[in-house]
Amino acid sequence: MTERTTETPRHPAPVVVVAGALYDRGRLLAARRSAPADLAGRWELPGGKLEPGEGPEEALVRELREELGVEVEPGERIPGEWPLKPGYVLRVWTARLLSGEPRPLEDHDELRWLSRSELDSVDWLDQDRPAVAEAGLRLPER
Ligand code: CDP
C-alpha cells in the first residue's frame, strides 16, 4: 500500500458566491442573466464569486460595482446557504443603493426594480428563491 504524503481533503471548501438583495425606495433589484445558456433568461440577485483573501461584503461591493456600475452599502446577511453547481454555494446579503442607477454592464441583459407585490413576477433561478422570499420580508418601506 502506498503512503499518502499529502492530505487531500475529500470535501474542499466550496467556492462562495455572494449575491445582493439590493434595496432602493421600497423595491428589490432583480437581474436577468444573459449567460451561460442554461441560466440565460432566468432572474437572480446580482453577485459573484468571492476572490481569495476577500471578505464577503467587500466582494459584494466589488461585484455590484462591476456588474451594475453602482455603489452599495452591505447590510445584514440573509440566514442560509444554498447549493449551486457542485462545489459552489450561494450566500446573500442585503444592501442599500448609495449612488448610481444600475445598468446591466456584465452578465445581465435586463434589470427590474420590484415592489413587494411584484416579487413573484419574474422567473427567479430556483437557488435564489429562498433568499428572495427572505429579502421580501426585509424590504424596507422606502
Ligand atoms: O461574476 P462571477 O464570474 O464571479 O460569478 P457569476 O458567474 O455571476 O456567478 C457564479 C455562479 O453562481 C454562476 O453559476 C451563477 O449562475 C451562480 N449564481 C446564482 O446561482 N445565483 C446568484 N444570485 C448569483 C450567482
Image (tube, rainbow, N blue to C red):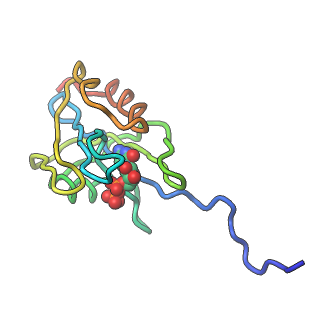
Q: Is residue 4 left or right of residue 68?
A: right
Asked if residue 25 shows in the view, the reply is: yes
Asked if residue 58 shows in the view, the reply is: no
Give how far across and how far down residue 99 sits, in percent. 12, 48
Q: Is residue 84 above or below residue 12?
A: above
Outermost residue on the front side: it is 37
Q: Is residue 4 above or below residue 92?
A: below
Outermost residue on the right side: it is 1
Question: Residue 45 sits in which quadrant?
Answer: top left
Give how far across and how far down residue 121 sits, in percent. 24, 25
How many discs mark residues in the rendered view?
A: 0
Q: Is residue 23 left or right of residue 76?
A: left
Question: Residue 137 sits in which quadrant?
Answer: top left
Q: Is residue 126 left or right of residue 88?
A: left
Query: What residue appears at the point 43 percent right and 68 percent down from the top-left corner?
Result: 53
Q: Is residue 21 above or below residue 72?
A: above
Question: Residue 24 sits in which quadrant?
Answer: top left
Along the line of sight, the residue nearer the viewer: 88 or 138: 88
Q: Quadrant of the C terminus?
A: top left
Give how far across and how far down residue 120 sits, in percent. 29, 24
Outermost residue on the left side: it is 101
Query: What residue appears at the point 17 percent right and 41 percent down from the top-left corner?
Result: 111
Give how far across and how far down residue 135 sits, in percent. 34, 31
Q: Quadrant of the N terminus?
A: bottom right
Query: What residue appears at the point 51 percent right and 44 percent down from the top-left corner?
Result: 83
Query: What residue appears at the point 77 percent right and 81 percent down from the top-left corner?
Result: 5
Outermost residue on the top side: it is 117
